[in-house]
Image: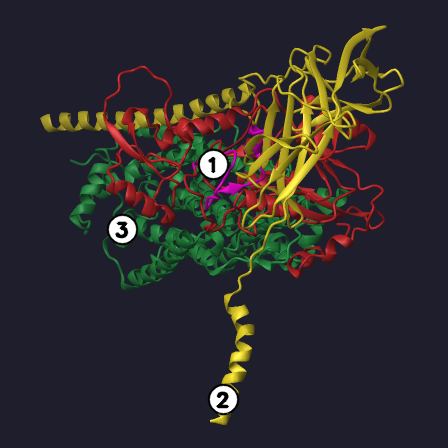
Chain colours: A green, B yellow, C red
């Protein structure tokens, strides 16, 4: 398949050469990853006592990271899926990144569950002795379904690009890569019939990805929502988590747009318009997210139910700064930056995205841990680590390792396929069948 | 020389004190608690029971595997059995109906049990005197009220004399203990009666066992009469095997249906996408073959 | 991760001995159990004739036909099945008399001793509660409530915890994957987690049984089991007999009788006369543990703090209305 020469020459250098900077950056991430692995070995050897989790706060950093990474996977569903269904043109340069965020964070998320499981050697019991009534079983089924679906969706979007790369004669890459493109492109030649099949499949999968992403994140929310714990037993949790996930996914997308634009000199393809559009998306979602958060806490605060009041008290005393950051600054600041035209510059929008994504992580922390610190029967203990949660270096290092793996996987994928979908960028009428 | 002599004398005189510390050992000799009791059960079997225990940290602990010798008679003791205590510290011996029991001067039988003691446990004896009593329990429905009537008689000079003023306790045995129903006091005619509660649960058919007994009576020992009859409320307790709930083995039906429908729907679409991939491959291969021929 | 059947330090010497004497390697034969449960029973099928040497409970070497031996796996599986079935036609319940409790903690000690628990695991826990500044403080012993609608059982993804017909909720420590969902599901904080190797000595010849639930297994959850092993022998749970004040009554609710070892009462009478209630009835979990209000105490609440050491006393520093 022939492709626009300029497109190819702009978008393929990343596949062809690897700069020293790339190796250096990769190495730094790898070091963080190695430290995390060392921490994991310590944890497996000595038991979970080396973490900060104790009998009341049984879920700490690991579950927070799990929900966070699963939430990031939402960006693919929204940007790629929804925008695909609505045929929005400006989405084209960024859909590949969005889909990659989806897959990679879906792979990393479950690992944090594994860190939290007490008996990893029995993990397969989830498949040999499942109980349908348990929200965790729903979660296992949902995540597997989501993973599989997103893989198919991603692969469908890659086929054309692999075909272009396969047919581009001047591509200076290693032979194994060329063979890879040949195999993975399935011999796609761009005929009318093939395009139709592909387009239909992509449409169907786009709809599926949206639906399954909503289901997955709702199921995750219900793991908390169906329990009786004060703060978790909220009817709004399903939609709330979904919106928050979209919020974090969109924020991450902006950050990655900025990084790749800078590193691979894609200023021509990812323009300010894209940043503004995704930024506006972020603002709209921030408004929804703020609305849901406000609604949840207003109803808790207004009523006189003791357990709710105790939780609100804790949030406003022990967790005051975190609460303000997550639920006020994290929402208002990005909105201001993007809503006011004067502030709408690419670096500012990226900063807004960074604030948004950090605020969301803190929001997850505030949802999980304070509830566990205020059970129905008060914690009456003398040991400080049993009264309140304080994460240890192992939990911090594994969090960083998760982020590093995310970065490393992204970097590796960018070496195999262009980060902007070549086929998407092309005009439709320039396609010919190449001999 | 003189100095050395003084030291030697001093040392030798102090030696006995040291030797006591060197050679004496701490031997805690346990002082046991031995108690002999007389039991007569509903089949008129007579049993002697001795409990051998000791006290440690305010807890009563048994002494198993110890030899207890049972005796009959007061002034003239005659050994009748030697039994080892079980792991609860209890030694039991059944008096056969042929055994000749001589009444003492006060018209009572005398029994005793003895523990000879050993290096670590002191010896102990326990003596009791018992008068034979005939206890009767009649369970009848009087004016549609379930009534328990107890009578007690002693044999005096060949004639039966009613027992009066003694306490008879009525129990229903349960899984861990005995549920007290009433404590009756025998009147001058040696009789007492009480109403049995109409709302006491029995087994699944409504059977209850009722026990009337003299409990640790000073004169009569422990004498009981028990009977099982259908005076309780039947309790039917069965959990159906396929109880569908969140906490049982089988999930509620709607849950299974919803999950199946959702999964079938989603994976059905996946299969459609995979089939599309296969179709693309087939079409590409066909196209390649065509072009090759051209 | 360590499994029950792997080599544990205390057993290695006996295992070596058995190996030297030529015990069959295929089935892991646990010879320390009473002979009858070890053998399959009177089966008339033809025996292979192959003999195996085993160590009996009194330390003697016996020769048994190989076909007659049950493997440890079979025995554990049978015990687990028994544990799931429970005791027929029973429904166990507990009544705690808050008017008598004075934090003697003998229940905690007996429970920890009987189940080989490390000192920081409390299956029955003593709280000092005060609902409001105007209401009384009271000591609150909290075992597992063995709810009739147990949240913990509903959320377990692998079925490691289950409710059986006689009302007791048990945990199978060989099935538990340690996800701790049950711990967040339980509103009464009744479950504890083994965050590290409990380092307890396992008694000789011990076979795993969810009714005893010993020893605690690293990475799994533990909780009060109403001493299900003792109930099989018609004995009261350990906390019931250990309490010097007779605070805890236990019994078969179907029989309408509960006892604290000394006093036996009709359950329904106790509830009505002493106004029994369940903790947080509004949560709807239908607990099997009932409480009698702390009315007409015979001693002040503070007396419960007198004999305790600092690590216990310090727990109750901030007691008050929440």
- Label 1: which secondary element: helix
**Picture residue at 83% right of the left edge, 41% below the top:** C295
Residues in magenta, as a range: C207-234
Q: Main secondary structure of the magenta part?
A: loop
Question: From mark 3 to mark 1, how far is it between C-alphas?
Answer: 27 Å
Going by the image, does A336 lie left or right of C67?
right
Q: Position of residue A146 (x, y in %)?
A: 42, 35
Residue at image mark 3: A12
Residue found at the very far left of the displayed protein:
B293
Going by the image, does A23 lie left or right of A144?
left
Query: Is C101 covered by the magenta stretch?
Result: no
Residue at image mark 2: B5
Q: C316 or B61: nearer the eye?
A: B61
Query: Is C215 covered by the magenta stretch?
Result: yes
- Graded by Cα atoms within 10 Å as few (under 14), some (14 to 19) or many (20 or more), the crowding at tag 3 reads many
**Picture residue at 48% right of the left edge, 39% below the top:** A78
Q: Position of residue A205 (x, y in %)?
A: 40, 31
Q: Position of residue B230 (x, y in %)?
A: 70, 10
Chain-order first, disc 3 or disc 1 = 3
- Label 2: which secondary element: helix
* Relative to A151, residue C269 above or below: above
Residue A82 marker: 1
- Graded by Cα atoms within 10 Å as few (under 14), some (14 to 19) or many (20 or more), the crowding at tag 2 reads few
- Graded by Cα atoms within 10 Å as few (under 14), some (14 to 19) or many (20 or more), the crowding at tag 1 reads some
Q: B258 or C316: nearer the eye?
A: C316
Q: Position of residue C1 (x, y in %)?
A: 38, 46
């Amino acid at each position: 398949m022939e492709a626009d020469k300029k497109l190819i020459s702009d978008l393929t250098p990343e596949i062809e050469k690897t700069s020293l900077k790339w190796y250096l950056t990769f190495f730094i991430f790898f070091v963080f990853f190695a430290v995390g692995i060392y921490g994991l070995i310590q944890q497996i050897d000595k038991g979970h006592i080396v973490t900060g989790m104790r009998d009341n706060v049984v879920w700490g950093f690991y579950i927070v990271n799990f929900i966070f990474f699963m939430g990031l996977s939402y960006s693919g569903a929204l940007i790629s899926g929804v925008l695909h269904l609505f045929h929005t043109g400006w989405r084209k340069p960024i859909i590949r990144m969005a889909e990659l965020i989806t897959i990679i964070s879906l792979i990393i998320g479950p690992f944090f569950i594994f860190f939290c499981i007490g008996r990893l050697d029995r993990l397969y019991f989830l498949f040999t002795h499942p109980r349908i009534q348990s929200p965790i079983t729903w979660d296992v089924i949902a995540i597997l379904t989501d993973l599989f679906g997103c893989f198919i969706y991603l692969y469908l979007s890659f086929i054309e690009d692999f075909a272009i790369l396969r047919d581009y004669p001047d591509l200076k890459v290693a032979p194994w890569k060329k063979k890879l493109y040949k195999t993975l492109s399935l011999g796609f030649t761009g005929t009318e019939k093939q395009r139709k099949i592909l387009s239909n499949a992509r449409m169907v999968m786009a709809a599926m990805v949206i639906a399954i992403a909503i289901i997955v994140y709702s199921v995750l929310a219900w793991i908390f929502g169906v329990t009786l714990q004060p703060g978790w037993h909220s009817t709004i949790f399903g939609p709330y988590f979904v919106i928050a996930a979209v919020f974090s996914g969109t924020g991450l997308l902006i950050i990655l747009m900025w990084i790749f634009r800078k590193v691979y000199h894609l200023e021509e393809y990812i323009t300010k318009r894209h940043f503004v559009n995704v930024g506006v998306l972020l603002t709209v979602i921030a408004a929804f997210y703020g609305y849901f958060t406000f609604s949840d806490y207003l109803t808790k605060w207004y009523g006189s139910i003791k357990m709710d009041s105790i939780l609100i008290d804790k949030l406003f005393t022990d967790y005051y700064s975190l609460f303000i950051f997550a639920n006020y600054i994290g929402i208002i600041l990005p909105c201001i930056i993007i809503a006011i035209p004067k502030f709408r510059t690419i670096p500012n929008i990226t900063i807004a995205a960074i604030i948004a994504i950090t605020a969301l992580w803190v929001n997850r922390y505030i949802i999980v841990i304070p509830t566990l610190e205020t059970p129905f029967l008060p914690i009456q203990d003398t040991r400080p680590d049993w009264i309140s949660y304080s994460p240890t270096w192992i939990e911090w290092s594994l969090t960083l390792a998760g982020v590093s793996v995310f970065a490393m996987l992204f970097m590796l994928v960018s070496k195999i396929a262009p980060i902007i979908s070549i086929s998407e960028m092309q005009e439709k009428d320039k396609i010919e069948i190449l001999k | 020389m003189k100095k050395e002599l003084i030291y030697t004398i001093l040392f030798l005189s102090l030696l006995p004190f040291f030797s006591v510390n060197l050679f004496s050992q701490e031997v805690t000799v346990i002082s046991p608690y031995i108690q002999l009791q007389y039991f007569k059960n509903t089949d008129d079997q007579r049993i002697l029971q001795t409990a051998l225990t000791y006290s440690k940290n305010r807890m009563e602990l048994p002494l198993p595997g110890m030899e207890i010798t049972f005796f009959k008679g007061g002034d003239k003791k005659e050994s009748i059995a030697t039994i080892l205590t079980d792991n609860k510290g209890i030694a039991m011996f059944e008096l056969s109906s042929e055994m000749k029991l001589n009444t003492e001067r006060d018209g009572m039988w005398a029994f005793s049990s003895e523990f000879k003691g050993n290096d670590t446990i002191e010896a102990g004896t326990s003596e009791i005197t018992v008068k034979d009593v005939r206890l009767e329990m009649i369970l009848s429905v009087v004016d549609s009220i379930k009534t328990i009537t107890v009578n007690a008689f002693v044999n005096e000079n060949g004639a039966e004399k009613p027992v009066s003023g003694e306490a008879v306790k009525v129990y229903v045995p349960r899984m861990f203990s005995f549920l007290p129903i009433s404590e009756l006091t025998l009147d001058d005619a040696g009789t007492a009666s009480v109403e049995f509660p109409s709302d006491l649960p029995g087994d699944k058919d409504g059977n209850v066992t009722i026990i009337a007994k003299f409990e640790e009576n000073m004169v009569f020992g422990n004498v009981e009469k028990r009977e099982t009859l259908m005076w309780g409320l039947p309790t039917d307790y069965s959990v159906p095997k396929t109880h569908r709930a969140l906490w049982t083995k089988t999930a509620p039906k709607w849950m299974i249906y919803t999950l199946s429908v959702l999964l079938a729907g989603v994976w059905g679409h996946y299969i459609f996408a995979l089939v599309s991939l296969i179709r693309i491959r087939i079409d590409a291969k066909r196209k390649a073959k065509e072009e090759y021929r051209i | 991760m360590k499994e029950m059947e792997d080599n544990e330090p205390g057993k290695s010497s006996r295992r070596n001995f058995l190996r030297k004497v030529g015990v069959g390697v295929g089935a892991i034969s646990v010879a320390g159990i009473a002979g009858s449960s070890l053998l399959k029973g009177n089966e008339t099928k033809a025996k292979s004739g192959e003999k195996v040497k085993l160590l009996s409970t009194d330390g003697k070497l016996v020769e048994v036909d190989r076909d007659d031996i049950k493997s440890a796996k079979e025995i554990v599986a049978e015990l687990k099945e028994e544990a799931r079935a429970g005791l027929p036609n029973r429904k166990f319940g507990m009544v705690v008399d808050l008017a008598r409790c004075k934090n003697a903690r003998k229940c905690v000690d007996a429970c920890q001793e009987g189940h080989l628990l490390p000192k920081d695991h409390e299956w029955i826990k003593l709280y000092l509660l005060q609902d409001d500044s105007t209401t009384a403080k009271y000591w609150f012993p909290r075992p597992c409530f063995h709810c009739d609608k147990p949240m913990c059982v509903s959320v377990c993804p692998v079925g490691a915890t289950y409710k059986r017909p006689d009302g007791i909720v048990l945990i199978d420590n060989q099935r538990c994957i340690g996800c701790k969902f049950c711990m967040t599901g339980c509103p009464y904080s009744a479950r504890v987690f083994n965050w590290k190797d409990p380092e307890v000595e396992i008694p000789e010849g011990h076979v795993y049984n969810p009714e005893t639930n010993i020893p605690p297994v690293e990475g799994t959850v533990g909780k009060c089991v109403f001493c299900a092993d003792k109930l099989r022998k018609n004995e009261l749970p350990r906390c019931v007999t250990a309490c010097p004040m007779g605070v805890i009554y236990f019994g078969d609710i179907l029989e309408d009788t509960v006892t604290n070892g000394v006093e036996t009462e009709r359950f329904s009478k106790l509830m009505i006369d002493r106004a029994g209630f369940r903790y947080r009835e509004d949560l709807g979990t239908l607990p099997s543990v009932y409480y009698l209000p702390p009315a007409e105490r015979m001693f002040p609440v503070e007396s419960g703090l007198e004999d305790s050491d600092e690590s216990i006393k310090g727990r109750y520093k901030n007691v008050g209305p929440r």
